[in-house]
Image (spheres, rainbow, N blue to C red):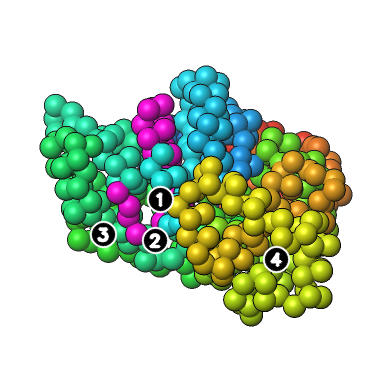
């Protein structure tokens, strides 16, 4: 493009040509846009100039170098393998990072996935989720054992409210020192937090008392123990706002600045946490939301709900169809399976499923009654008809048989605690409801538990009327490319606004993602 354009299509094309500079000019009372300053038109006035912009510039170059990426974009882990091997590979091939959703899966299943990822991505970066489960510390220990045995070099650590000995073990066993004294973290940790409290301990080195325990046990060498005091517990911290699944539903505009301020404190004090990257997650389903996160200071962005609706996600076509119909207000909080007794909720899809109401009813029954035998007859009949589809007397033997195989200590406690027995029977439904969803069990579609945040509805509104309205056309790398390019586009519009130029309203929306390409870096831009 060598001339100033004044027509609608020309102005939009010029603004959207992110790999070229953008000149806004006033000539003959009309506003036009081009990629070169006007030379021949007399009386033309340049109102504003903005340089080329690439998505990499929106985030942190240090984050890209640390993880060997081409774009400041990550797909967070979704439990039960929803963040599948195919999803991780597709984004890795596109120069983005993705975390395999290991939470809730048996160790043997996780091992199979990790071996496949090693095979398919021998050189590209990828991560695997490590979730903290206070009710089952053995699972965390076995998962870390698996990571160390298979050489997993990057994890996404979620739900940690305090450091644990196995998280510290993973981090510290990867530490080494070069001849020049430089410390390398062979095991990278990307922490996911929703509050400033956990972020603070991830910014600091591992607690000395946990390091000492590991050294006494022989899990760490003396050098590793010493190096653990010189590096933060995490390389990056993702601040998760109003997201799918477990969430505090706090706004990103308050949470992200709090964590950035904590990192600034580390920098002023000269402590190791000054080098930790800070990313943003939760509610990111449109280019505007992605740009807003970068504008707040995020080093990278993390998506979740929008990926679950893509072809590569490890969930059923029935779930993807429901997600494609979701609106921004079609999410609700419902009792979680893993922390049912504590009253902890997760954010799920309400549209097209009865799960949220049924799960809430189960928690009311648990709150109001001391045991299964104390449940009134009408409620008991409804439980047998709608929830369990079998006599209530048959439920505990079925649940107990499973627990004796996998959690014998919990089965033993429940034999002597009728209230715990009731909770475990109710958790049978809560736990299986997510599996029915991922399998697409047609007999249980009314009971699908689908983790979903408002980003899904925002994404659907953005792509309405395009090929991406149909879930079979949504691919994670293309979605990443469109979000990043759209964020760069909105950064250009913001620069023009700050320069006092307001283009017509039809320039505000990013071009629709009808033919969006996967992320790639060409000529300094993301296309």
Of pointers 3 and 4, the one earlier in the residue sequence:
3
Q: Quadrant of the C terminus?
A: top right
Q: Nearer the viewer, mark 3 or mark 1?
A: 1
How far apart, in angstroms, are the residues tagged by discs 2 and 1?
A: 14 Å
Badge 3: how crowded within 10 Å, few (<14), some, or many (20+)? some
Cα distance, mark 2 to mark 3? 20 Å
Q: Nearer the viewer, mark 3 or mark 4?
A: 4
SS at badge 3:
helix
Tell me if residue 504 can be seen. Answer: no
For marks 3 and 1 on the same chain, the one whose residue lies earlier in the sequence: 1
Q: Residue at x 34, y 36 (%)?
A: 187
Q: Using the image as rendered, state which of residue 394 and residue 250 is in the foreground.
A: 394
Q: Secondary structure at mark 1?
A: helix
Q: CA distance from mark 3 to mark 1?
A: 31 Å
Find numbered disc 4 in the image and state the secondary structure of the residue it sits on.
helix
**Mark 1 highlights which residue?**
137
Mark toward the viewer: 2 or 1: 1
- Say whether residue 526 is left or right of residue 263: right
Sooner in the amino-acid sequence: mark 2 or mark 3: 2
Residue lying at the far bottom of the rendered structure: 368
Pointers 2 and 1 in contact (CB under 8 A)? no
Residue 266 is labelled as 3
Which residue is identified by label 2? Answer: 161
Residue 136 image point, x, y percent: 45, 52
Viewed as shown, does residue 515 lie left or right of 430?
A: right
Q: Which residues are magenta?
A: 143-165
């Amino acid at each position: 493009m060598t001339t100033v354009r004044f027509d609608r299509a020309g102005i939009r094309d010029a603004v959207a040509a992110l790999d070229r500079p953008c000149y806004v000019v006033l000539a003959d009372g009309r506003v036009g846009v081009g990629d070169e300053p006007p030379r021949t038109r007399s009386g033309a006035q340049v109102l504003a100039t903005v340089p080329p912009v690439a998505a990499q510039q929106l985030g942190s170059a240090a984050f890209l170098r640390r993880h060997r990426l081409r774009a400041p974009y990550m797909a967070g882990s979704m439990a039960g393998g929803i963040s599948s091997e195919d999803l991780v590979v597709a984004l890795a091939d596109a120069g983005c990072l993705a975390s395999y959703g290991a939470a809730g899966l048996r160790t043997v299943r996780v091992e199979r996935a990790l071996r496949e990822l090693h095979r398919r991505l021998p050189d590209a970066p990828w991560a695997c989720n490590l979730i903290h489960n206070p009710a089952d510390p053995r699972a965390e220990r076995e998962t870390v054992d698996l990571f160390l045995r298979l050489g997993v070099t990057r994890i996404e650590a979620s739900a940690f409210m305090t450091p644990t000995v196995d998280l510290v073990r993973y981090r510290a066993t990867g530490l080494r020192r070069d001849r020049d004294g430089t410390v390398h973290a062979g095991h990278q940790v990307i922490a996911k937090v929703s509050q400033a409290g956990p972020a603070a301990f991830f910014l600091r080195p591992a607690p000395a008392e946990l390091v000492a325990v590991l050294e006494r046990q022989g899990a760490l060498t003396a050098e590793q123990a010493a190096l653990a005091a010189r590096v933060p517990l995490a390389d990056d911290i993702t601040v998760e706002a109003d997201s799918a699944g477990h969430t505090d539903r706090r706004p990103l505009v308050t949470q992200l600045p709090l964590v950035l301020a904590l990192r600034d404190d580390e920098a002023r004090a000269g402590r190791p946490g000054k080098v930790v990257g800070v990313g943003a997650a939760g509610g990111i389903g449109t280019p505007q939301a992605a740009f807003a996160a970068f504008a707040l200071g995020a080093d990278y962005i993390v998506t979740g709900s929008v990926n679950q609706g893509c072809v590569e996600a490890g969930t059923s076509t029935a779930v993807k169809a429901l997600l494609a119909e979701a609106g921004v207000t079609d999410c609700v909080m419902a009792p979680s399976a893993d922390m049912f007794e504590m009253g902890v909720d997760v954010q799920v899809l309400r549209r097209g499923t009865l799960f949220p109401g049924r799960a809430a009813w189960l928690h009311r029954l648990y709150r109001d009654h001391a045991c299964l035998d104390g449940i009134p007859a009408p409620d008991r009949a409804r439980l047998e008809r709608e929830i369990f589809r079998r006599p209530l007397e048959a439920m505990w033997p079925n649940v107990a048989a499973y627990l004796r195989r996998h959690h014998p200590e919990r089965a033993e406690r429940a034999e002597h605690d009728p209230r715990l027995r009731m909770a475990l029977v109710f958790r049978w439904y809560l736990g299986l409801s997510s599996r029915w969803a991922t399998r697409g069990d047609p007999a249980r579609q009314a009971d699908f538990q689908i983790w979903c945040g408002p980003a899904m509805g925002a994404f659907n509104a953005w792509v309405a009327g395009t090929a991406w309205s149909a879930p079979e056309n949504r691919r994670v790398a293309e979605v990443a490319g469109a979000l990043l390019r759209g964020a760069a586009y909105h950064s250009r519009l913001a620069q023009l606004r700050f320069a006092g130029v307001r283009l017509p309203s039809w320039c505000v929306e990013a071009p629709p993602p009808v033919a969006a390409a996967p992320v790639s870096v060409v000529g300094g831009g993301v296309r």
